[in-house]
């Protein structure tokens, strides 16, 4: 290995012929040929006189831009001098959202490393494949997340250096080592297309995949979705439930606030009750979470202080119209809906304010192109088909044969079925593998779920196809009750409710009541597990 550069990731990118078409044809996306995203997001703010601004705030305290720059500089120096990191090495971060985790994220990029942020909830069996596939060489781990980490790390042949920290308490080994470093650090500046991070998918369809994103991709979501849809101003406070390991959370809590001179409000526990409390306590302006969390917060919204809220963003899964309407009725805020993907880094179709059309996800975000493809792979002017998108970000899997499934003809084909209307709005139909064909009828599972969720007895639900000798498939609903336990009478009531809400042939012919639904660690529903368990 070249001692000045570790080529492991670049050597394992897909063949360029299998890459999507990347588009940087807007002025705000015209990035320099050589750059470091950490410099652009953090250091430039300090250099321009904004160092006194509050960068991060949480229940443990607050940190200015200058203080965060100093801390990330010292950690970067520690990685290079004590850890012998060379550009291209992979550095795993493990811990709940915190100021220290953000400082580590910036530090790895400054040192020239490639960030692999993992959720603290991952167990040893889930960490092991990530360590192996990404050939992790360094790790910065919250001391409260060591048990599973140690079990996974003991089997790694590539891990060379690890340091631990104590959340934002300032009492860990990493903090002491960093404090002993001299201030200042000259960040590594390389090609703008050099890998900056590997984001592992959340596993809604099975085995997670490593998505490689470059330094431009750390800026592009801010300069496309955030700039044009959210229209941020300096000084806003950004908060949300998703972990920074999830690219939805990375955008909400790092990329967007730092690109627009805001403040990141971090929560170690982003559950709906904690999130609702934090809005009032930290005067949150910009809120990011999933539809299930918005629905869960509705029950306590009357007693909460949400007066500071300006914008509420929903993503991570399909937004049911019932949740959109209920949130607007309870808060006065129209949720900003959006679809994104780990492969695309962040949201690429969305709408806000007066542009919101009920029932539609939105229109393509400036900087991106999107269409729906027919069964032959041709773009449709309007109609229903597979969603395809391209823009300044795109899918490049790390050493994974599934690249040619996701990228076809230069388009990122997301695995979603959408309907495009004459006004350019995209309407979600289903995940492409969530279409149920019953007696010749195509039935979209989310449409049935939306109908069920409108019933007061339903807290959560999932709909899948179940084999049937007469119909080929039937619609089966797994239902979590809002209160009490389900019985045959409630099942019949739900079936009648669906028949009265949507076309009767779409009603669930089987209803099973369950205590909980299978989800990823980021809260996304895993219908494939229900199908596997049924099989």
Image: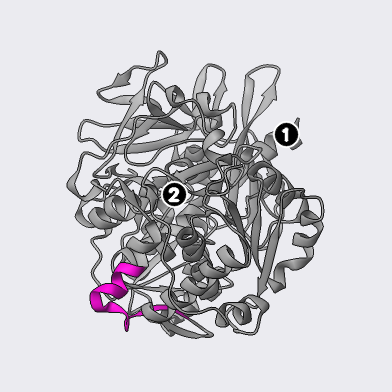
Among the 4 quarters of the image, the one containing residue 47: bottom left
Examine the rendering and report whether any part of residue 261 can be seen. Answer: no
Magenta span includes 28: no
Magenta span includes 47: yes
Residue at 57 percent across and 22 percent down: it is: 438
Instruction: Please name whichever residue, 80 or 448, is drawn nearer the observer in this view of the structure.
Output: 80
- On residue 320, the disc is 2
Residue 201 at x, y percent in the picture: 57, 44
Q: In the picture shown, does residue 133 fall above or below 70? A: above
Examine the rendering and report whether any part of residue 520 can be seen. Answer: yes
Task: Say which residue label 1 marks.
Answer: 532
Residue 94 at x, y percent in the picture: 63, 63
Magenta highlight range: 43-57
Residue at 27 percent across and 78 percent down: it is: 50
> Seen from this angle, which residue lies furthest top?
376
Compare marks 2 and 1 and give the one earlier in the sequence. 2
**Distance in Å between CA atoms under marks 2 and 1:** 25 Å
């Amino acid at each position: 290995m070249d001692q000045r550069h570790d080529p492991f990731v670049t050597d394992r990118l897909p063949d360029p012929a299998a890459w999507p078409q990347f588009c940087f044809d807007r002025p705000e996306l015209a990035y320099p040929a050589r750059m470091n995203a950490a410099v652009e997001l953090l250091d430039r703010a300090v250099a321009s006189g904004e160092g006194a601004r509050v960068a991060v705030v949480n229940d443990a305290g607050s940190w200015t831009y200058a203080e965060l720059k100093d801390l990330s500089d010292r950690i970067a120096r520690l990685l290079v001098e004590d850890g012998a990191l060379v550009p291209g090495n992979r550095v795993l971060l493990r811990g709940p959202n915190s100021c220290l985790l953000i400082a580590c994220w910036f530090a790895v990029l400054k040192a020239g490393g490639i960030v692999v942020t993992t959720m603290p909830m991952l167990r040893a069996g889930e960490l092991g494949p990530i360590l192996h596939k990404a050939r992790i060489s360094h790790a910065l781990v919250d001391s409260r997340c060591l048990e599973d980490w140690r079990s996974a790390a003991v089997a790694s042949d590539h891990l060379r250096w690890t340091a631990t920290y104590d959340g934002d308490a300032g009492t860990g080994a990493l903090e002491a080592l960093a404090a002993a470093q001299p201030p200042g650090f000259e960040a590594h500046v390389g090609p703008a297309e050099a890998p900056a991070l590997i984001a592992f998918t959340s596993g809604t369809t099975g085995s997670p995949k490593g998505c490689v994103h470059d330094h431009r991709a750390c800026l592009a979501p801010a300069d496309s979705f955030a700039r044009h849809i959210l229209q941020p101003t300096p000084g806003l406070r950004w908060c949300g439930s998703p972990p920074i390991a999830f690219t939805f959370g990375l955008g909400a809590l790092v990329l967007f606030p730092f690109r627009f001179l805001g403040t990141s409000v971090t929560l170690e526990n982003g559950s709906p009750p904690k999130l609702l409390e934090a809005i009032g306590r930290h005067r949150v302006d910009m809120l990011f979470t999933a539809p299930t969390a918005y629905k869960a917060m509705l029950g306590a919204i009357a007693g909460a202080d949400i007066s500071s809220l300006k914008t509420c963003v929903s993503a991570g899964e399909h937004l049911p119209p019932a949740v959109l309407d209920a949130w607007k009725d309870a808060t006065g805020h129209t949720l900003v809906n959006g679809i994104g993907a780990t492969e695309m880094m962040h949201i690429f179709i969305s709408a806000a304010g007066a542009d919101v059309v009920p029932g539609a996800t939105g229109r393509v975000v400036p900087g991106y192109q999107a269409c729906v493809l027919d069964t032959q792979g041709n773009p449709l002017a309007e109609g229903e088909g597979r969603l395809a998108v391209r823009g300044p970000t795109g899918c490049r899997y790390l050493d994974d044969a599934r690249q040619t499934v996701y990228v076809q003809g230069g388009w990122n084909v997301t695995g979603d079925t959408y309907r495009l209307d004459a006004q350019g709005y995209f309407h979600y139909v289903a995940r492409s593998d969530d279409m149920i064909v019953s007696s010749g009828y195509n039935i979209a599972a989310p449409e049935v779920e939306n109908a069920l969720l409108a019933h007061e007895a339903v807290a959560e639900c999932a709909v899948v196809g179940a084999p049937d000798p007469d119909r080929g498939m039937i619609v089966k609903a797994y239902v979590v009750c809002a209160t009490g336990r389900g019985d045959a009478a409630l099942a019949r009531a739900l079936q009648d409710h669906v028949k009265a809400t949507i076309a009767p042939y779409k009603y669930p012919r089987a209803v099973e009541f369950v205590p909980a639904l299978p989800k990823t660690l980021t809260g996304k529903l895993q219908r494939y597990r229900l199908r596997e368990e049924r099989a």
